[in-house]
Image (cartoon, rainbow, N blue to C red):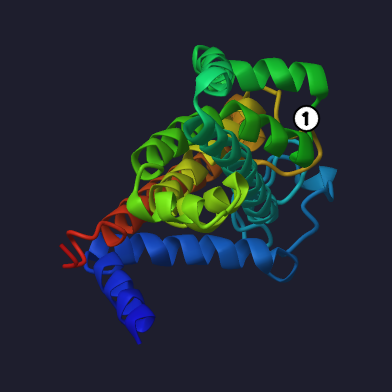
Amino acid sequence: MERNNKLKKFVRTLFSRKIVIGAFVVVVVFILVAILAPLLAPYDPNYADFAAYLSQPTKAHWLGTDAYGRDVLSRIIYGTRVSLIIGVLAVCIACIIGTFFGMIAGYFGGIVDDIINRMTEAIRAIPQVVLAMALTAVFGSGIRNLAIILGISSMAGYVRMMRGQVLSIKQADYIMAGKLQGNRNFQLMFKHILPNSISPIIVMMTQQVGATILSEAGLSFLGLGISAPTASWGSMVSEGRLFLLQNPVFALTPGICVAVLVISLNMLGDGVRDALDPRLRGEI
């Protein structure tokens, strides 16, 4: 009963603002487009019809075609799937690795904390996009590699966040009671500390998905992300900017998709942050 009441308060607070409701609807639409891409796309995204080279929007091609005669709408639909897969996978990788090392650093302290902090500071000293560019040049592109690279380059924030949470929780009475009962360190960390530290991590994950999608689009725009012929919003903007006069929709539409999805994810992340704040839920 108490859990149901907390869930109701969370949902009520999350959707208390119209802008969050709108952002949620937009994100759900993009997710459905990604899932149903084979059904929604009118053409194979990689099918080249050279007779329709740089076609303007028509009934056959609603958003026109690119320099290879490929349907722009179909490629945007499949690009949605690529962006969301990379965004979610990269954030999950960053969260799992960063949360684990942050929890170890905060709980054990001492030399373990110093080593992890130095590694985290070294990663944070390099801008994420620059680090991702360097790692992409070494390990190559592709959906899997790009997700791992973006996850590694953004995990430092989770390390610092989790370390701070552990430092504030590990001296609590219930943690001391668990030690006296003979619980091992990792039992205390995963059964007691982690569940009580997860709220800010969830908020960070929600907000980080949009930033990761933007990073992927930037790398693809520079030619270091998703390689041809796989559809990617960033690479489509890069290709389309060369043909703005022939077919401006080719470059503008994927750029608008990136902006709308990233803004909606950030707005939804703000809503999740407010919903997880006990003061706004009326618990304090």
Q: In this view, does 62 lie to the left or right of 159?
A: right
Residue at 30% over, 81% down: 5
Q: Is residue 30 above or below residue 243?
A: below
Asked which quadrant contains residue 74, the reply is bottom right
Which image quadrant: the N terminus?
bottom left
Badge 1 amino acid: Ser
Q: Position of residue 165 (x, y in %)?
A: 39, 41
Say which residue appears at 70% left-offset and 30% top-offset: 225
Q: How many marks?
A: 1
Q: Is residue 284 visible?
A: yes
Q: Quadrant of residue 100?
A: top right
In the rendered structure, the answer to whether residue 16 lies left or right of residue 146 reads left
Task: Tell me which residue sits at (77%, 52%) in the image.
Answer: 45
| Neighbour tally class for label 1: few under 14, some 14-19, many 20 plus, Cα within 10 Å | many
Please give left or right for residue 237 compared with residue 144 in the image. Answer: left
For label 1, the residue is 141
